[in-house]
Structures are given as C-alpha cells and as structure tokens.
C-alpha cells in the first residue's frame, strides 16, 4: 500500500469527522462503513502483494460476521508461479494436465485471485457462486480452494465429453447445456474465442 493512498483515506476520514462534529451529529454509519471498506481493500491488496500465493485476507474487524471486501477486477501483479503447488496438487488429484489448468486460469483471470466478472464469477478460475457452493467452496477468493474446485469441475466436463478438451472448455465457458443443445461448441462468439484462446495457450 502506498503512503499517499493511506494519507488520502485518513484525510477523508478526518474531514468527515470534523463535519460531523461541526454539525453536532454523529458520523453517518454508511459513510463510516464506506471509508472502512476502502481502507480494508487497500490493506488486502498490500497483503496479497507482500505474500503472493498466500490467499489469507484481512478480515474486517468493524463489521459483524467478518465481512470481507473485494474489488472487482483488482489489478494485482501476482506471479503465475505463486500457484504452482496448488495447481500441481489439483492436477494430480483430478488427473488433469497442469498446462490445461494454467491455460484456463490465464484466460479466466490472468492469475488474479481477486478477479470478479460482471456476471459474478469469482477468483482464479472464475467460479460462479452456485457452482462454487456445489463443489464445496467456502471462499472463492481462496486460491487453493478455487483451483481445486475449478479443476474438479473441468475434470467433470472432460469425463462428460470423453476427454474432448475443446468440448470440455466450451462447457466450462458456456455450460454443458449449451454444448449438448448444439451438439458441439456453441455458436457463440465469446465461447469460440475462449476455446481458441485456451487451446492456443495449452498447446503452445
């Protein structure tokens, strides 16, 4: 976390506090919560960068039930090698090529464990919340859990389509229902580009 970022946040809090005091009113809980969320986000990013590969995040001491704050598509520079151990373990457990897992992660999140799509997909392998829950994930932003679950789901798709990697990837992206409906890769531009992108990385 840069000092200037902290200074800006602290200054914002001080200004809000002074305003509340001058008006003889207590500070708005909503404003206070926004400040604390912004501060927590900065701390989480700094923690992630200082301990790449360690998916433990700061839990908010200000909010009941320890709500954890994430920023959609946060820009973080985490080396892909930070996740090698988790990828190797998942690959061996589910009999999926490590290169394929790397290729999926590269296409899905570019190795950003805090990635979140506009549709709500989360983490390294961009798991949808319902899918994540069905696979036993309790924290989709935990890199190890995300890789384990994403690889397990990829294995399920490979089994469903007789180890046809392209069909498995299409199902990973667009859902098996669409693959079954179209009896192949669905005619969706996004899915076609996705399969091509992952396959190029996988076979490179």
Image (spheres, rainbow, N blue to C red):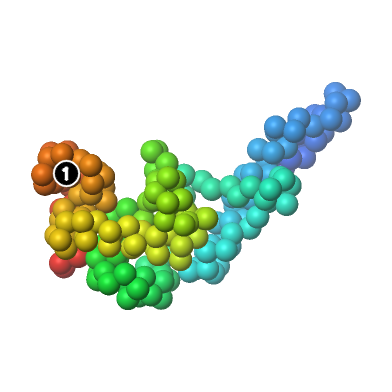
Whether 166 is drawn above or below 93: the answer is above
Image point (32%, 53%), residue name: 108
What residue is at 11 percent from the left and 46 percent from the top?
Answer: 184
Relative to 165, 24 lies left or right: right
- In the rendering, at what x and y percent does residue 168 appear? 20, 55
Task: Describe residue 170's horizontal placement relative to residue 14 as left or right.
Answer: left
Residue 80, compared with residue 66, is above or below; it is below
Residue displayed at 24% across by 65% down = 100
Find residue 146 and report its horizontal and vertical position in percent: 43, 59
Q: Residue furthest left?
A: 183
Whether residue 199 is situated above or below residue 64 in the rendered picture: below
Which quadrant of the structure image shows residue 113?
bottom left
Residue 34 image-quadrant placement: top right
Task: Confirm whether residue 3 shows in the render.
Answer: no
57 and 128: which is toward the camera? 128
Disc 1: CA contacts within 10 A as few (<14), some (14-19) or many (>=20): some
Describe residue 59's horizontal placement relative to residue 91 as left or right.
right
Who's the residue at 20% across and 40% down the image? 178
């Amino acid at each position: 976390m840069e000092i200037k970022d902290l200074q800006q946040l602290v200054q914002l809090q001080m200004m809000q506090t002074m305003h509340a005091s001058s008006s003889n009113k207590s500070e708005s809980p909503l404003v206070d919560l926004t400040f604390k969320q912004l501060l927590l986000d900065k701390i989480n990013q700094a923690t992630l960068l200082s301990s790449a590969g360690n998916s433990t995040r700061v839990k908010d001491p200000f909010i009941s039930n320890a709500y954890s704050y994430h920023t959609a598509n946060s820009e973080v520079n985490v080396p892909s090698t930070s996740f090698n151990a988790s990828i190797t373990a998942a690959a061996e457990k589910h009999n999926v090529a490590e290169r394929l897992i790397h290729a999926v992660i590269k296409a899905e999140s570019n190795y950003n464990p805090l990635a979140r799509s506009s549709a709500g997909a989360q983490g390294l392998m961009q798991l949808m919340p319902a899918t994540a829950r069905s696979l036993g994930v309790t924290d989709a932003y935990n890199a190890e859990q995300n890789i384990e679950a994403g690889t397990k789901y990829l294995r399920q798709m490979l089994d469903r389509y007789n180890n046809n990697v392209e069909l498995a990837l299409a199902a990973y992206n667009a859902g098996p229902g669409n693959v079954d409906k179209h009896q192949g890769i669905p005619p969706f531009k996004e899915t076609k580009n996705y399969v091509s992108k992952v396959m190029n990385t996988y076979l490179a």
